[in-house]
Image (cartoon, rainbow, N blue to C red):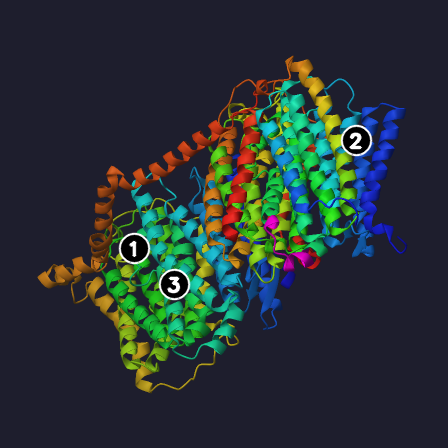
């Protein structure tokens, strides 16, 4: 291991060191605000450590990890998302009695798993990252242990997610049996010459395993239940970081191994993408529960994103497609994080424990104008209205699809977006209706949470109005 | 100065935003100060730019929205001599008209809304002329169209005004559709919509007369014809007079309707590659100017006379463009903005002081009652008729002479233009004689105040001496060959307006010929009616387009198409229900679906691999 | 190599069988405890496949991955059992079919 520049994996070291530190801290003294601030500082340090790490890349750190600008970019993104989750969780946990310190520890570990996925260049790192992220999430989803819904969500997520992971592991075992290597570049080299019926089965099982984590059809069933049951900040984390990390890892693997060479895999991904766009949007169409609407729409969003993978396999120069994927991931992560965070804050501010059904939104605009406005921006971005990040992301995807001549998928994208417009705007419409004259006891959320929301929404608008700088960055690092 | 270019459209935009958001809370004084002041400040910015201008085009990249593949969308400005002329007209004349409006609209309950729309219009128009790419230009183009719609229908509680606004919107839309197609075609051809880059690429790729060039320019011309109210899309402009008079002066005389001229001038390098389109421009211009002049002769509504005359004068500009007299057209655009704004504002003053009287037959003898308005109107009419030494004389003369030297059908174009000049003088002075001389029919109940008098005075000065201002467009357009026309051509061109003036004297001051007798004769009656109705083009369109459309609409009233949409909606609902029911919340069922999913995937892969 | 040589295909077949058994258990068992056990069976099927593939290629990697999978399984099960305890406490039953409040 001589000659390794440890700066290259500085974010990983910061996060794992920080997790140990936090554990010791909690063992020494149970103090929620203290561990809250410590976690936030560790995540911020992890995000910042990407800056010096830039000097040490590109570098392979053991065969498992590849430190390059791709890894650092997503590391920064996930660390920031984790930071946002931690900041707003404090608000959420505020009224909960009992021990909250482990909540922050779990977010930290889950983020560590996501960052590992961004670096992963080998099956082992992929599995480690996926499980670290997943197992922490089981506990996070069921964290409010006095309530039934989170518990039900957690048990469903645990069983199905574990089954999906195992399916993925089994698929990879078959791949290993066929090609005899476990690292991405090696797989790519071996795939070029391999021709084994086992490969077919492995392709299907790998798609199934990762498809579950991305919640695409037909592995989407868990999504609404888990989204609804989980605490709002964790739902945002799940949508932004968990899916983003899996996709980032998948995209790297896809490109590094030329995975699209696997027979039938492109067809599979295209079918899954098309079905997700359609089914996700249709399921959301008349749904009354806000969190479920967002859950179903996330299925559709993942379907949109898969277009990129298909395009990567078809075009000679996949740069545009990779840029599109990265841009969309950034936009989607920020937007869904903002949407769930705001939903949580609005719930608290409205007095009720959780804003559950669409009816609860009625007249919200007049009771909570500030937060409602921000929520509206987030919804518009999800719907892909111009001058928001969501629009630019979708437009980028569209260009990538056009470059790959994927007319069928693009048609579904357009149809899906049209359906999407209906249910997103329906929520906005509900908020603007004249509501109850007597507002419930209004409770202002604390300033860190409010500031974070403003930051997220501003970022969304910035990426929608001035997308140039980020595009430029993506162009240089991908 | 280059760094301040963005201020020019930003100032009116900021004011419009403030007025829309908080106009209801502001006192009328503040509203007026904001509305007028912002355009005034923009005018000062333009003035500074003009003073410091070195002759080279200024380019300013403000904001790139996004750049994906070949498409680049954003806001960037390109300011050369042509743009500066337009900027000066828009902000200069615009400022005077805003000032005038402050008094004219005083007491209107939607005072803030009025200024918000007007400022928004100025913003859109400035964007249109400053844009360096056709996409942004189109954005401004649609913006002015929307503002025009809002302002024609400003007094929307009268249904007729709403109908006029809709007509303007729909008719220009036909042109805009053609223009959008032209943009798509150009983008497909060159992969850029940047005007300068496109012009350069076109010069390299297309030889003169290339069919694609002809098609693309013809489509652009479609847009120009719609916006500038030329044949066959001219019918909306006379009805557009339903808006407040200052709006007619600013939008439907001085600025927006000349956007078509600007578009053709701006893309002249494309048009030069398409001689057939260029000829079409000249012929459209000629036919429009004659047709509109005849129609103007037979109107009673003072604003409609001016509207038809605007159509006619823009016809001159198109004629000039068509024969390659680019500079002369832009020059006429500028002088026309001066004298037509003056005429409209003077007409507005008359209407203002005569309890909203529009019909010139109910006016008369106002020479002594409204002396300032009389002088303004006289100067405006003289410039419109191109009497020697007025501003209109210089610009129109250039166009008429250029028409004579046109390579194709030059003398014919010239003869038409001269006939038009004769008619212009005739209808202009008919207006002057009928309104200001003779018996007094209606007494004015007030005099225009300083807010209205000042713009009139300033515009009088410009209408008189504006012809001595040059337009700095020599770098923009190719050098025209300046052959000297024969003396008789010049003499006739100059003399004809005087003839028209003389005939008007004879006819309408009753010293010899009696206009009433002429009109009363059977052929006179028929022609009068025909021209009064604008050659019955509206009737024709009604029969050709509106009636069939209404018929179709009646046919579709039973909603066969809606039923199709209804079926789509129903299908979506059905699928939603079916899928929703699958979400039973049972863990084991979810697991089963996953397993089935894996099996299905395996099957698909198996089949795909054969 | 001495001793019994088992072809990789046979071991993979056995692993697939185990995997299918685990999946079936996931689908038909109602007691969460048994569902978790089915997951263990599936996980071990994957591990077995890795070991046999590693042996086939003559690499230690397969066995290393086996160790890793054991660790992962331990983590999963520990969290899983924690949740099972909570389920028993809240719902007074371990029947997963009872947990259907989240639906639609």
Q: Which mark identifies residue B224?
A: 3
Magenta stretch secondary structure, dominant: helix
| Residue at image coords 75%, 40% | A128
Q: Is residue A117 visible?
A: no
Rendered-image quadrant of the C terminus of chain A:
bottom right
Q: What chain does mark 3 sit on? A: B
Q: Pick whichever, A478 or B429, lies toward us.
A: A478
Which residue was labeled with disc 2?
A105
The span picked out in magenta is: A188-199
Q: Kindly state the secondary structure of the residue where label 3 is placed.
A: helix
How crowded pointer 1 is (Cα within 10 Å; few <14, some 14-19, many 20+) is rated as: many
Q: Quote the CA–CA distance across marks 1 and 2.
A: 78 Å
Q: What chain does mark 1 sit on? A: B
Q: Kindly state the secondary structure of the residue where label 1 is placed.
A: helix
A384 left or right of A41 in image: left
Instruction: Tell me which corner region of the image, top left, top right, bottom left or bottom right, holds residue B598.
Output: top right
How crowded pointer 3 is (Cα within 10 Å; few <14, some 14-19, many 20+) is rated as: many
Tell me if residue A189 is in the magenta stretch. Answer: yes
Q: Quote the CA–CA distance across marks 3 and 1.
A: 22 Å
| Residue B259 image offset from top left, x and y in percent | 43, 61
Which residue was labeled with disc 1?
B304
């Amino acid at each position: 291991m001589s000659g390794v520049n440890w700066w290259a994996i500085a974010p990983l070291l910061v996060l794992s060191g920080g997790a140990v530190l936090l554990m010791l801290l909690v063992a020494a003294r149970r103090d929620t605000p203290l561990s809250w601030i410590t976690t936030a500082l560790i995540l911020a340090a992890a995000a910042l450590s990407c800056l010096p790490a830039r000097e040490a890349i590109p570098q392979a750190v053991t065969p498992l990890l590849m430190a390059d600008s791709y890894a650092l970019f997503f590391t920064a993104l996930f660390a920031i998302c984790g930071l946002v989750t931690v900041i707003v969780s404090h608000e959420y946990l505020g009224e909960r009695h009992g021990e909250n310190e482990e909540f922050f520890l779990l977010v930290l570990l889950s983020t560590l798993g996501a960052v590992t996925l961004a670096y992963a260049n080998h099956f082992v790192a992929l599995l480690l990252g996926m499980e670290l992220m997943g197992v922490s999430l089981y506990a996070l989803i069921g964290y409010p242990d006095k309530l039934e819904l989170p518990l039900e969500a957690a048990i469903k997520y645990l069983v199905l997610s574990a089954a999906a992971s195992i399916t993925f592991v089994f698929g990879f075992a078959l791949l290993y049996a066929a090609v005899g290597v476990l690292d991405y570049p090696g797989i790519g080299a071996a795939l070029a010459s391999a021709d084994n019926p086992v490969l077919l089965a492995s392709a299907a099982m790998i798609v199934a395993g990762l498809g579950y984590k991305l919640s695409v059809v037909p592995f989407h069933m868990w999504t609404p239940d888990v989204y609804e049951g989980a605490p709002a900040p964790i739902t945002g984390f799940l949508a932004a970081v968990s899916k983003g990390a899996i996709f980032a890892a998948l995209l790297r693997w896809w490109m590094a191994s030329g995975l699209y060479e696997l027979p039938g895999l492109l067809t599979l991904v295209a079918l899954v993408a098309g079905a997700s766009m359609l089914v996700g949007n249709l399921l959301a169409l008349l749904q009354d529960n806000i969190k479920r609407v967002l859950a179903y729409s996330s299925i559709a969003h993942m379907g949109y994103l898969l277009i990129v993978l298909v395009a990567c396999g078809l075009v000679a120069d996949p740069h545009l497609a990779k840029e599109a994927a990265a841009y969309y991931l950034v936009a989607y992560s920020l937007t869904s994080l903002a949407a769930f965070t705001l939903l949580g804050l609005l719930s608290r501010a409205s007095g009720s424990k959780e804003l559950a059904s669409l009816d609860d939104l009625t007249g919200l605009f007049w009771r909570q104008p500030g937060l409602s406005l921000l929520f509206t921006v987030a919804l518009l971005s999800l719907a892909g209205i111009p001058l928001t990040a969501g629009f630019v992301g979708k437009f980028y995807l569209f260009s990538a699809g056009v470059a790959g001549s994927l007319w069928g998928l693009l048609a579904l994208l357009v149809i899906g977006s049209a359906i999407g417009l209906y249910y997103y705007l329906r929520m906005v419409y509900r908020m603007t209706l004249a509501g109850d004259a007597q507002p419930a006891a209004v409770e202002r959320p604390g300033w860190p949470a409010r500031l974070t929301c403003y930051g997220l929404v501003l970022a969304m608008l910035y990426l929608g109005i001035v997308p140039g700088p980020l595009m430029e960055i993506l162009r240089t690092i991908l | 100065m280059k760094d301040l270019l963005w201020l020019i459209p930003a100032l009116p935009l900021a004011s419009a935003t403030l007025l829309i958001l908080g106009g209801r809370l502001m006192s009328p004084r503040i509203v007026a100060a904001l509305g007028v002041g912002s355009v005034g400040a923009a005018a000062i910015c333009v003035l500074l730019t003009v003073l410091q201008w070195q002759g080279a085009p200024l380019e300013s990249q403000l904001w790139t929205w996004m750049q994906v593949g070949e498409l680049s969308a954003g806001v960037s400005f390109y300011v050369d001599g042509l743009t500066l002329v337009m900027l000066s007209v828009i902000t200069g004349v615009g400022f005077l008209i805003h000032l005038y409006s402050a008094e004219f609209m005083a007491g209107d309950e939607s005072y803030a809304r009025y200024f918000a729309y007007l400022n928004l219009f100025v913003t859109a128009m400035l964007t249109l002329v400053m844009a360096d790419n056709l996409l942004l230009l189109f954005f401004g183009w649609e913006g002015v169209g929307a503002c025009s719609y809002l302002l024609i229908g400003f007094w929307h509680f009268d249904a007729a005004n709403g109908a006029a606004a809709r007509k303007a919107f729909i008719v220009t839309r036909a042109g805009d559709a053609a223009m959008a197609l032209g943009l798509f075609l150009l983008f497909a051809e060159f992969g850029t919509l940047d005007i300068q880059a496109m012009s350069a690429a076109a010069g390299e790729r297309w030889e003169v007369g290339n069919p694609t060039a002809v098609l693309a320019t013809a489509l652009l011309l479609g847009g120009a014809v719609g916006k500038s109210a030329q044949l066959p899309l001219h019918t909306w402009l006379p009805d557009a007079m339903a808006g407040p008079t200052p709006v007619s002066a600013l939008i439907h005389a001085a600025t927006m309707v000349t956007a078509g001229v600007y578009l053709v001038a701006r893309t002249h390098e494309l048009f030069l590659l398409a001689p057939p389109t260029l000829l079409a421009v000249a012929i459209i211009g000629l036919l429009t100017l004659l047709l509109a002049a005849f129609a103007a002769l037979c109107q009673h509504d003072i604003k409609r006379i001016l509207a038809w005359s605007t159509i006619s004068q823009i016809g001159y500009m198109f004629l000039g463009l068509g024969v390659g007299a680019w500079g002369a057209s832009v020059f006429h655009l500028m002088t026309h903005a001066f004298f037509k704004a003056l005429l409209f504002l003077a007409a507005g003053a008359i209407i203002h002081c005569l309890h909203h009287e529009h019909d010139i037959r109910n006016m008369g003898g106002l020479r002594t009652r409204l002396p300032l308005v009389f002088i303004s109107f006289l100067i405006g009419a003289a410039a419109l008729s191109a009497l020697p030494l007025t501003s209109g004389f210089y610009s129109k003369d250039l166009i008429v002479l250029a028409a004579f030297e046109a390579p194709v059908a030059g003398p014919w174009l010239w003869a038409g233009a001269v006939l038009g000049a004769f008619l212009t003088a005739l209808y202009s002075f008919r207006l002057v004689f009928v309104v200001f001389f003779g018996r007094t029919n209606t007494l004015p109940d007030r005099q225009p105040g300083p807010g209205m008098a000042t713009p009139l005075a300033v515009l009088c000065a410009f209408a008189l001496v504006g012809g001595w201002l040059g337009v700095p467009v020599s770098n923009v357009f190719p050098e025209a060959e300046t052959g000297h026309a024969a003396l008789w051509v010049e003499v006739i061109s100059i003399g004809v307006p005087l003839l028209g003036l003389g005939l008007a004297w004879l006819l309408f001051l009753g010293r010899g010929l009696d206009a009433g007798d002429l009109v009363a004769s059977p052929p006179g009656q028929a022609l009068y009616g025909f021209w009064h109705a604008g050659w019955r083009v509206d009737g024709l369109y009604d029969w050709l387009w509106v009636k069939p459309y209404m018929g179709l609409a009646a046919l579709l009233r039973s909603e066969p198409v809606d039923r199709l949409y209804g079926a789509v909606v129903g299908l979506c609902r059905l699928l939603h229900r079916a899928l929703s029911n699958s979400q039973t919340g049972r863990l084991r069922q979810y697991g089963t679906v996953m397993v089935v999913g894996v099996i299905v995937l395996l099957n698909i892969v198996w089949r795909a691999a054969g | 190599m001495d001793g019994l040589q088992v072809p990789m295909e046979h071991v993979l077949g056995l692993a697939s069988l185990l995997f299918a058994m685990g999946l079936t258990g996931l689908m038909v068992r109602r007691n969460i405890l048994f569902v978790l056990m089915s997951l263990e069976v599936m996980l071990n099927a994957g591990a077995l496949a890795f070991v046999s593939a590693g042996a086939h290629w003559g690499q230690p990697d397969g066995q290393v991955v086996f160790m890793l999978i054991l660790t992962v399984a331990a983590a999963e099960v520990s969290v899983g059992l924690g949740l099972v305890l909570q389920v028993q406490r809240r719902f007074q039953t371990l029947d997963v079919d009872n947990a259907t409040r989240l639906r639609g």
